[in-house]
Image (tube, rainbow, N blue to C red):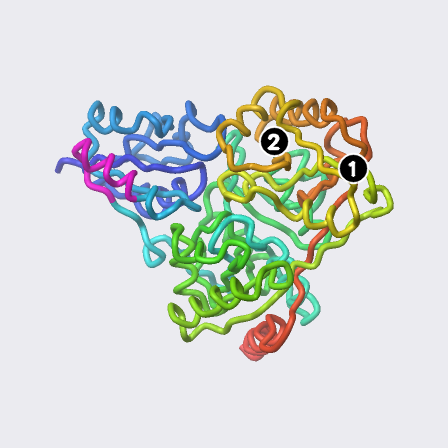
Amino acid sequence: MRRERILILGAAGRDFHNFNLVWRDDPSVEVVGFTAAQIPGIDGRRYPAELAGTHYPQGIPIFDEGDFEAIVRDLGVQRVVMAYSDTAHETVMHLASRALAAGADFSLCGPRTTMIASSLPVVAVTAVRTGCGKSQTSRYVADFLREAGLRAVAVRHPMPYGNLVEQKVQRFGSYEDLAAHKCTIEEREEYESHIDNGTVVYAGVDYGAILVQAEREADVVIWDGGNNDLPFFRPDLWIVVADPLRPGHELKFHPGETNFRAADVVVVNKVTDAKKADVDAVVANAKALNPEATVVLAASKLTLDKPEQVKGRRVLLVDDGPTITHGGMPFGAGKVAAEKHGAGATVDARPYAVGSIRGTFEKYPHIGQTLPAMGYSDTQIRELAETIRATPCDVVVSATPIDLGKLLKVDKPVVRVRYELQDLEKPTLREVLQGFAARVLRA
């Protein structure tokens, strides 16, 4: 029997998961390669034989997505599978058109075939776009479950940008674990706050193996989603976070619209920062597309360490990298906090950016006067620090979720912005979670 030849378009996460779950052990299929997008420096590797299974003794190559038509032709690809997230619907169809024009079929994998069933209750936290507020929502869920007397473990969407064999299953319970696993800034942004709150985090490459280990130390598993991707585990309570600062995006991005339509709870976040008309528009879309869902209004409550260092000063804003880059936001929480506390002026880092940081600004021209905290490699972390040192400012306002001042060597004070989810009116997320916890405790 001739095996169907498949190319998977990915970004070192969903692509590997789909392969592991759907095709790794399927003798009728040959995955001839993955492609890489969104994340710098993740092409040119191989998905290793140790993870790829018996049908792939040489592993599987990872190509740059820009070359995928040539790959389709040269390797006789019959089907191209889209397997990454936070992508405009129009972009998805451009990829489909490129695949069809090159002579291949085009497909997506849905939740039914890519969610793993857990033996424990699962709360999934997803979003319609990157930067809606998943992280503070996941922390809120973890804190509530702990208060309810339930052991909760967070399993984070994958970010395996290093040695994939070593990253098969990763457990993070301390800052020492972050160092041992050589975490990037993006990984630290997602793990540190959980560790600070006493929540163990799992991540890696093989989510079947990860789930088995996570279940051993939990009563409830929290799926802490990445970008606007679908959950990898089948949820018993599915939460999606929407952003009224980007109204309408809940209908325009893949697979965020799927989350929006399928979730049990729609959390409309940042309500106090958005225009009422935009909040109303997102709520109306939720009620029209997902009428069975509970709609919760919430705020992203900002606090600033040492606000006296900001008032009247020249500030450099540093924000979460994915939110500012492929998330499409020209600014983040840093701008809101700096203006709230009377910053004198915002200094533009673009003229002082070096290396890959300068390249990031060129690739994403929508970025305003904020510096995305890019740090996917040691070199990029050094270039980020060099850019900060070169920018003529009095203080750095860091709205990335990590303690940037501890990680980077800079010659300026770094003031942190912190943000937590805050319920505003009934029905609240707390009330939803009370009902969920009661069901778990009765079981």
Residue at (61, 76) in percent of width and height:
431
Give the magenta range.
93-106
Counting residues from the start of the chain, the first of labels 1 and 2 encountered is 2
Circle 1 packing at 10 Å, graded few (<14), some (14-19), many (20+), is many
Give percent across and percent down for residue 350. Answer: 62, 27
- Rounded to the nearest angstrom, the CA distance separating label 1 from label 2 is 17 Å
Indicate whether 337 appears above or below 398: below
| Quadrant where the image shows the N terminus | top left
193 on left or right of 236: right
- Please tell me which residue lies in front, 252 or 410: 252
Indicate whether 368 appears above or below 264: above
Q: Disc 2 designates what residue?
A: 375
Residue at (40, 43) in percent of width and height:
84
- Please tell me which residue lies in front, 288 or 1: 288
| Mark 1 or 2, closer to the camera | 1
Indicate whether 431 appears above or below 159: below
Give percent across and percent down for residue 36. Answer: 40, 32
What secondary structure do most residues of the magenta stretch adopt?
helix
Residue at (48, 29) in percent of width and height:
363
- Determine whether the residue tagged by mark 2 lies in a helix, strand or loop: loop
Q: Disc 1 designates what residue?
A: 414
Give percent across and percent down for residue 290. Answer: 40, 70
Q: Amino acid at mark 2?
A: Gly
The image quarter in which residue 262 lies: bottom left
Residue at (63, 58) in percent of width and height:
273
